[in-house]
Amino acid sequence: MTKKALFLLLLALALLAPACAPDKKAQEEMHQEIQGLKNEIKALHEKLARLEAGQQEILLLLQRPAAPPAAAAPPAPQEPLSVSQLLRDKALFQGLRVTVRGLPGPVLVHRQTLFLKAPEGMVEVYFGRLPDVQTINRLSSMVLEQPLTITGTVTIPPPGGGNPRINAEAVEF
């Protein structure tokens, strides 16, 4: 190589060197962005650890056998509930077979439904599936002035859906 070629090579390298070197301001910004991303990763790891701990707690709760609270036990089955008691504790009796005693209200013959009334509200009683056809006819045709004792399963409608309903299995006059 000649001196002239060597000189041109050094000149080219000298001109290209500042173009390749990163700017200090850009380096600082990039460093700050990297630190921000590291902080975000730490926060996400902490959040993930909390979620995993919560999941473990839920799994432990699901594995334990659920014991019904002693204070929330329904009354003895031989003693009929009043309509007021049923309305007050309706969530407790959801899906259970109960015996309720109360004064009859309106009877909707076409729907084979009657209402037991109380000062707090009414309970709808569907009697169309009673095994005794004579009882169905008696409920549909006569004026009911005496308290009735109804045995059946309680279903609660969704909020705003109406009165609690009993699917009657037996009726005592």
Image (cartoon, grey):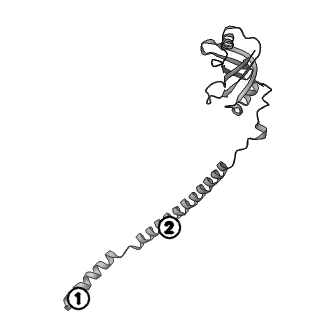
Q: Nearer the viewer, residue 15 or 113?
A: 113
Q: Position of residue 7 (x, y in %)?
A: 23, 87
Residue 83 appears in view: no
Residue type (three-letter) at the residue carrying disc 1: Leu
Residue 171 image label? none
In the picture of the structure, the residue carrying the numbered disc 1 is 6
Residue 140 is left or right of residue 81, and the answer is left
Above or below for 7 versus 44: below
Residue 39 is left or right of residue 119, and the answer is left
Q: Residues within 10 Å of mark 1 (few under 14, many from 20)?
A: few
Q: Residue at x 52, y 62 (%)?
A: 41
Determine whether label 1 and label 2 are within 8 Å by CB. Answer: no
Above or below for 7 versus 169: below
Residue 35 image label? 2
Q: Residue at x 63, y 15 (%)?
A: 112
Residue 162 appears in view: yes
Q: Residue at x 73, y 29 (%)?
A: 88
Q: Look at the image and tell me in which quarter the C terminus lies.
A: top right
